[in-house]
Image (tube, rainbow, N blue to C red):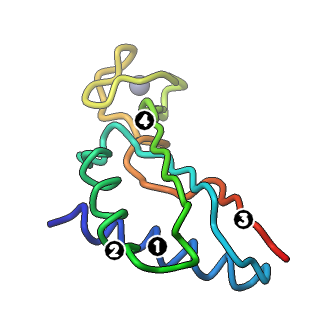
Amino acid sequence: MHEYGIAYDIVVTSRKAALDNNATEITHIYVDVGELSIINPDQVEFLFSAIVEGDPLFQNAKLTCTKVHPETRCSCGYAGDEIYVCPKCGQLPEIVRGKEVVVTRIEVEAD
Ligand SMILES: [Zn+2]
């Protein structure tokens, strides 16, 4: 299950960020989910809650996933969101954004 690996990575990344900042609690984690990543954000949120259950660092942690629209560009100069065929020259555009799942912000409480 791909979502499990994503949720697990989010937990590991957040825990490391919290410990690096001497945080006692993580309150909110923001994640960008690219529309091309074929990830179900609801599933990620569910698995995240299951993984952190009973962990005091995460007891009030909220996870917010934001869908990110794809961005592509082509060597001919085209930039937009066509992912299969460049509307200007017909080549395969390069995907700049929209495939990744990235933790963008972590809010923590520190003593
Ligand atoms: Zn093109």
The residues bearing labels 4 and 3 have C-alpha atoms spaced at a distance of 23 Å
Task: State the residue lying farthest toward the right.
Answer: 111
Q: Amino acid at mark 1?
A: Val
Determine which of the numbered discs, if any, sits on residue 35 in the image. Answer: none
Q: Which residue is mark 1?
A: 11
Q: Quick check: marks 1 and 2 in contact, CB under 8 Å? A: yes
Compared across the picture, whether 77 is left or right of 91 comes to: right
Q: Quick check: marks 2 and 4 in contact, CB under 8 Å? A: no
The residues bearing labels 3 and 2 have C-alpha atoms spaced at a distance of 18 Å
Q: Which residue is mark 3?
A: 108
Determine which of the numbered discs, if any, sits on residue 67 in the image. Answer: 4
Measured from the top left, where is residue 26 in percent x and y?
Answer: 63, 67
Q: SS of the residue at dot 1?
A: helix
Q: Quick check: marks 3 and 2 in contact, CB under 8 Å? A: no
**Residue depicted at x 35% and y 66%:** 7
Measured from the top left, where is residue 88 in percent x and y?
Answer: 39, 14
The residues bearing labels 1 and 3 have C-alpha atoms spaced at a distance of 13 Å
Q: SS of the residue at dot 3?
A: strand
The residues bearing labels 1 and 2 have C-alpha atoms spaced at a distance of 8 Å
Determine which of the numbered discs, if any, sits on residue 51 in the image. Answer: 2
Q: SS of the residue at dot 2?
A: helix
**Disc nearer the start of the sequence (1/4):** 1
Q: Amino acid at mark 4?
A: Lys
Q: Quadrant of the N terminus?
A: bottom left
Q: SS of the residue at dot 4?
A: strand
Measured from the top left, where is residue 97 in percent x and y?
Answer: 48, 42
Q: Residues within 10 Å of mark 3 (few under 14, many from 20)?
A: many
Q: Amino acid at mark 2?
A: Ile
- Name the foreground residue: 18 vs 86: 18
Ligand 1 neighbours mark 1 (CB distance < 8 Å): no
